[in-house]
Image (tube, helix red, strand yellow):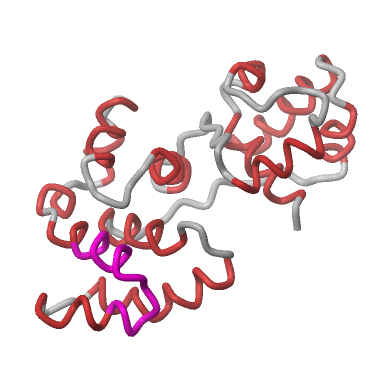
Amino acid sequence: MESDKAHKALLKISTEKNFGLLRRYLEKSEPIEIKLSSLPLVEYLSSVVVSQQLSTKAAKTIWSRVHPLVKSYTNYANLDAELRLGGLSRSKANYVIGLIGNLNLSTLQKNDLMKMSNIEFESLLLANKGIGPWSVQMARMFYLGDADVMPINDLGIKHAHEHFFSEHALNEKFYEPFRPWRTYLSLFMWQSLS
């Protein structure tokens, strides 16, 4: 399995680079699989918008109220008010309505997206209000299953970096040696925070 291969590779890299804290953490950790979303793209992106700048618990609660509206909206006139009642801010409600109204996104299948280059995929998503680089990275990781994404601007990654690599600057170059397994490294880093 890819997760086993990634776990072994990350252990090897952490040993070679003398990242003792990470190596010890990986030694006592089981491989982690990337959990892919089975939602249609618009619903998935809406869930990402909902989760922006919220705790996981708060995001799950709000998404449980908003998802049925996104999944089966029937009346645009009431959608804003219903999304706001579900717990979304005015701007997030507008972002979700924009995603729902984007016919290009709603017609694309996962196979179509898998054929795109990272740049094409990023351009497609960034054309939507409310979708920024972090959202694109989450989609690459948890919608497409890209094994090599490092969201260095994610707050959890920043905290885990301080723990595991406090003597190193947080930047893209630092994480180059972990290619092509940076998504898996991210999963371990997030897991270490719990």
The span picked out in magenta is 83-97
Q: Nearer the viewer, residue 192 or 180?
A: 192
Residue at (43%, 78%) from the top-left corner? 64
Is 46 covered by the magenta stretch? no
From the top left corner, tell me how far across and down residue 12 is, in percent: 78, 21
From the top left corner, tell me how far across and down residue 132 is, in percent: 36, 43
From the top left corner, tell me how far across and down residue 13 is, in percent: 76, 20
Q: Is residue 1 visible?
A: no
Does 47 appear above or below 142? below
Q: Main secondary structure of the magenta part?
A: helix
* Quarter of the figure that contains the C terminus: bottom right
Does 13 appear above or below 88? above
Residue at (46%, 51%) from the top-left corner? 36
* Quarter of the figure that contains the N terminus: top right
Tally the numbered discs. Answer: 0
Does 119 appear above or below 161? above
Is 85 covered by the magenta stretch? yes
From the top left corner, tell me how far across and down residue 17 is, in percent: 81, 16
Q: Is residue 74 left or right of residue 6?
A: left
Q: Is residue 156 left or right of residue 48?
A: right
Q: Nearer the viewer, residue 90 or 22?
A: 90
Indicate the quadrant where residue 25 lies: top right
